[in-house]
Structures are given as structure tokens and as C-alpha cells.
Amino acid sequence: MIMFNRNYKMLLSTFISMFFLSNLVFADPTDGCELDSNQLFLTAEGAVLYNAAEDIAGFQFNVDGAGVNGASGGDAAAAGFTISNSATLVLGFSFSGGVISAGCGTLVELVLDGTPTGLSAITISSPQGNAIDFTYWEEDDGGNGQVSDGCD
């Protein structure tokens, strides 16, 4: 009986540990530094997270599944970007040539009406005006982070 009880406790402890670890490993990103290089992710709260391998001079994307009531803040505002939005589109750039330095963080904060499902038609530009290939982080059915080209 003692051996069974000890094995049961060990099995239960292993199961609980794996359950909590899988929730941590397969959860949506909460910080831009959790993304792969040149990726974006939109949280349910409206934060657009990014991880960029090079400086960003401008960005534009559509918000899917929710209306955009406002866009401000984040590293875009800190870099002096002008940030504009319509009901579905967000646009940011600097009139003075400012850039968002390569790295990771929150690109911009959105005020949303509804629950977003992602970003599409992603366009990110370098200080030279060249397109930077960005993808959108998505979770597959197995809970693993996947990427989309942002052109859904």
C-alpha cells in the first residue's frame, strides 16, 4: 500500500507539473521578446508586440476580427511616430525620420471594439524605404506557435 501511494503521488505530481509547464510553454506571447525575429502579435487587450531584426521606419497593418477605435503609445510613440487609424487599418511613421530601433517590445497600443483574431496585410519599412518581411505569430491547434505571412 505504501509503494502504491508513493507511485500515485509521483504520477500525480508529474501530471500537475506537465500541465502547468505546457500552459506556460504554449501560451500566447505576453512580451515581444517571446516572438521570433521579424514577427508581430496582437494581444486580446490590444497591444501589438514585435521583435525586429532591424530598425523600423514605418508600419501598416489591418486588424482582423475587431474594430480599431484608437492607436497610440508603445515604442512607436516613444520614437516620435505619427500614428493613425481607420476602423480596420493602423499606420505609423515619422515625419522627422525617427526610427524604432531593432529589438523587441510593444509597437503600439490599440483601442479595440470586439475581439481581435490577428493582423493581416502587414507592411513594415526600413529607414531606406525597403520592405522588411514580417510574419504574424499564430497558435496552431496543438498549441504551438506558428507564423503567418500576414497576407491572409
Image (cartoon, rainbow, N blue to C red):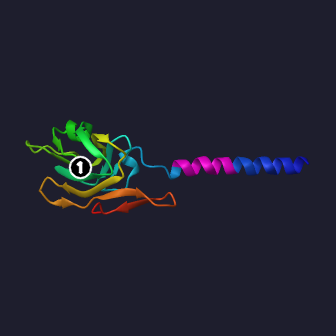
Residue furthest out toward the left: 96
Residue at 24%, 39% (x, y): give it: 69
Q: Position of residue 124 (x, y in %)?
A: 21, 55
* Rendered residue at 91%/48% (across/down): 1
**Where is residue 143 shown, x and y percent of the image?**
50, 57
Q: Is residue 138 above or below residue 66?
A: below
For label 1, the SS is loop
Indicate left or right for 3 with 44 as reference: right
User: In front here: 4 or 83?
Assistant: 83
- Magenta stretch, residue numbers: 15-24
Magenta highlight: main SS: helix
State the residue position of label 1. Answer: 88
Kind of residue at disc 1 = Thr
In terms of depth relative to the viewer, which is nearer, 132 or 53?
132
Q: Quadrant of the C terminus?
A: bottom left
Q: Is residue 78 magenta?
A: no
Residue 19 on the magenta segment: yes
Residue 129 in the figure: left or right of residue 70: left
- Left or right relative to 74: residue 17: right
Asked where in the image residue 38 lies, by quadrant, the reply is bottom left
